[in-house]
């Protein structure tokens, strides 16, 4: 079973690219972020034509997440618990049934937090605290659970081509990184680093200053696995080549293979 995550940076602008990737790689589940579309305007039909069930949690012009699954999506829950006043569409959670039991997915688009010194950074940290509480709740269920998405966190210096350039950025602040580690300390496995310790392993290249051509990237798209999901892990990867396609997102897909 192949499960992938990808910040597509706008479903309308990137739909041809996303459909080409789906036809090429055929993931069983795809978690999409930054769809930038309200639910009723999300172009469901092309994805359904490829055999996917579609669930979205959208917002006009900003944010938004979606789940695509070849199996029916069950017990769909929208919004990250913990703040009923938070109107930003950044989280959707659902399960699918497999021969080995249910596997649940949390698809997230974590706040960027920039610029520092504004309300955006405390919002990011508070959102991460809510995510930690939600993750603890899921872990207590003792099932196969995954948190996939654009975390907007560079975990370690090795995860940036030029880490010294990120010292004043919310993605690389000690508080952001500490909360990411707190998620791991709960018992989650960070999939990519469990598969490779290679340098220059990136998932994002900015559109500016020839970042892609210079391989000036960062790794901010992550998959965290509960112990039960980790037991099923058989492989993982990053579809870096997609960044070189026409009209690409600035992110690329990250995926895991589960024995399920």
Image (cartoon, rainbow, N blue to C red):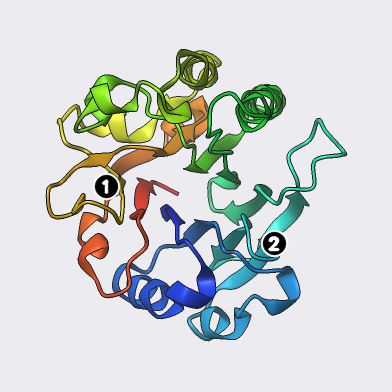
Residue 18 is drawn in which quadrant? bottom left
Residue 140 is drawn in which quadrant? top right
Residue 80 in the image, given as x and y percentages of width and height? 73, 39
At x 53%, y 46%, the residue is: 100
Task: Classify mark 1: residues with Cα within 10 Å, few (<14), some (14-19) or many (20+).
Answer: some
Give SS at disc 2.
loop
Total residue callouts: 2
Residue 207 in the image, given as x and y percentages of width and height? 30, 56
Q: Residue furthest left?
A: 214
Q: Nearer the viewer, mark 1 or mark 2?
A: 2
Residue 180 in the image, given as x and y percentages of width and height? 49, 22
Which numbered disc covers residue 237?
A: 1
Name the side, left or right, on which 92 lies relative to 223. Answer: right
Q: CA distance from mark 1 to mark 2?
A: 27 Å
At x 47%, y 75%, the residue is: 13
Report the front residue among 140 and 61.
61
Residue 67 is drawn in which quadrant? bottom right
Task: Classify mark 2: residues with Cα within 10 Å, few (<14), some (14-19) or many (20+).
Answer: many
In the rendered view, tell whether residue 63 sits above or below residue 109.
below
Query: In the rendered image, which quarter contains the N terminus?
Result: bottom left
In the rendered view, tell whether residue 152 sits above or below residue 21.
above
Report the front residue among 145 and 93.
93
In the rendered view, tell whether residue 104 sits above or below residue 62.
above
Q: Residue furthest right?
A: 84
At x 71%, y 22%, the residue is: 133
Q: Earlier in the sequence, mark 1 or mark 2?
A: 2
Residue at image mark 2: 58
Residue 86 in the image, given as x and y percentages of width and height? 80, 41
At x 31%, y 50%, the residue is: 206
Give SS at disc 1.
strand
């Amino acid at each position: 079973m192949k499960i992938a995550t990808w910040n597509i940076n706008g479903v309308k602008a990137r739909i041809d690219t996303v459909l080409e990737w789906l036809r090429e790689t055929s993931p069983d589940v795809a978690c999409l972020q930054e769809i930038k579309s309200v639910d009723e305007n999300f172009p469901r039909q092309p994805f359904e034509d490829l055999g996917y069930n579609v669930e979205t949690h959208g917002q006009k012009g900003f944010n938004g997440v979606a789940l695509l699954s070849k199996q029916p999506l069950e017990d769909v829950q929208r919004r990250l618990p913990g703040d009923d006043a938070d109107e930003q569409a950044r989280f959707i959670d659902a399960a699918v049934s497999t021969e080995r039991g249910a596997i649940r997915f949390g698809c997230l688009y974590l706040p960027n937090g920039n610029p520092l010194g504004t309300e955006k950074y405390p919002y990011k940290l508070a959102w991460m605290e809510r995510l930690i509480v939600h993750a603890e709740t899921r872990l207590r269920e003792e099932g196969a659970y995954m948190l996939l998405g654009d975390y907007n966190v560079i975990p370690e210096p090795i995860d940036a081509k030029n880490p010294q350039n990120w010292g004043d950025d919310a993605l690389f602040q000690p508080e952001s990184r500490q909360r990411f580690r707190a998620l791991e300390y709960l018992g989650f496995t960070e999939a990519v680093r469990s598969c490779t310790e290679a340098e220059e392993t990136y998932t994002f290249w900015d559109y500016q200053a020839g970042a892609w051509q210079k391989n000036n990237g960062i790794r901010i798209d992550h998959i965290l696995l509960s112990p039960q999901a980790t037991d099923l892990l058989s492989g993982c990867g990053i579809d870096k080549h997609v960044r070189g396609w026409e009209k690409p997102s600035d992110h690329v897909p990250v995926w895991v293979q589960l024995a399920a």
